[in-house]
Image (spheres, rainbow, N blue to C red):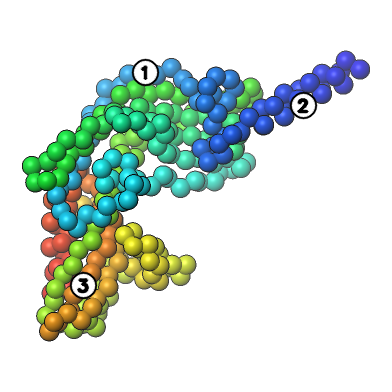
Amino acid sequence: MKKILLLLAVAGVSMIVTGCVTNPSQGGIVQGGGILSTDGDATPINYPPLKIVVPGDSGIVRPAGKSVVGDLVIANYSTTFISNAHYGRVFIDKKLPDSFIVHSRVDNGTAGSGVKYKVGYKMTSGADGGYVVDFNPESRSEYQQGLIGKFPVPPFNESSLRGYLKSFTLRYKFEIDAQYGSDAIMANFLRMAVVKNQATGYADPVTGKIYKQYFQVNYSGATANYTVQVFPYRNGSKAVINMELPVVETSPSTVDFGQIISDLRKQLTTIVQS
């Protein structure tokens, strides 16, 4: 009888653990103490900050409240399923006016393990009506949840953090006038640009409109997707381009979107006017 009661008690604990999930969208995270806590001891780190320069350019698309800082947007990494129904994600957590947490987590929908980096940020005005955002990694903590069979802590280090911060991007729209007809301009893109066909549809990064065909451009090793629409305009045509700007360091620890915009406009203008 004692053995039966012990088994029932263990089963009861299991039900309590499973029943603690209150936020499945963040991997079953329960704030506060306990076996599902994500709180760990924070260790200060000394890692180079990242500066992102945003110009005062009217082509930058305002993200209507969906940005993290200023007009900068970042997509949470897609969930990646691995063996035994485990999956992982990286996302921004606990955003405050001067800091946020970059949270890397692996779990089975309830218990898991994770690494959390606190990143301070500061936005200052730029000389051309734009602004500058400085991201400063401050501390690291990690945790493992559950009673037995705990997950290994994900291999998310300072280099991984830098890669995630460089996922910040801007949505940008610009127009290029041409002296040739609409069909000729679109033919230039089909001939000279990298063309991608998407059977399931590709959502325009600016408008959300679904396209079966889009284009890619390489810039300093980074790839950006963009869409093109061409309309008759005066005695020629106008190409309207929507894209998510690629994120590369234009100088050490600095991403200057002003330079990136200038270079890409020249590159795509060459296609339009060929």
Where is residue 72 drawn, in percent x and y? 28, 45
Q: Residue furthest left?
A: 127
Where is residue 100 drawn, in percent x and y? 35, 31
Residue drawn at the location 22% of the way across and 46% of the way down: 248
Where is residue 213 drawn, in percent x and y? 36, 71
The residue singled out by tag 1 in the image is 43
Determine the image quadrant of residue 28. Answer: top right
CA separation in Å, label 2 and label 1: 37 Å
Numbered mark located on residue 259 in the image: none
Q: Residues within 10 Å of mark 1 (few under 14, many from 20)?
A: few
> Residue 191 vs residue 111: left or right?
left
Residue drawn at the location 49% of the way across and 46% of the way down: 79
Q: Toward the viewer: 268 or 204?
A: 204
Q: Residue furthest top?
A: 2
Q: Residues within 10 Å of mark 2 (few under 14, many from 20)?
A: few
Where is residue 242 drawn, in percent x and y? 27, 63
In the rendered structure, which amino acid carries the disc numbered 3?
A: Ala
The residue singled out by tag 2 in the image is 11
The residue singled out by tag 3 in the image is 239
Q: Are marks 1 and 3 in contact (CB under 8 Å)?
A: no
Q: For the residue labelled by badge 1, is the local secondary structure a helix, a strand or a loop?
A: strand
Earlier along the polypeptide chain: callout 2 or callout 1?
2
Q: Toward the viewer: 90 or 240?
A: 240
Determine the image quadrant of residue 59. Answer: bottom left
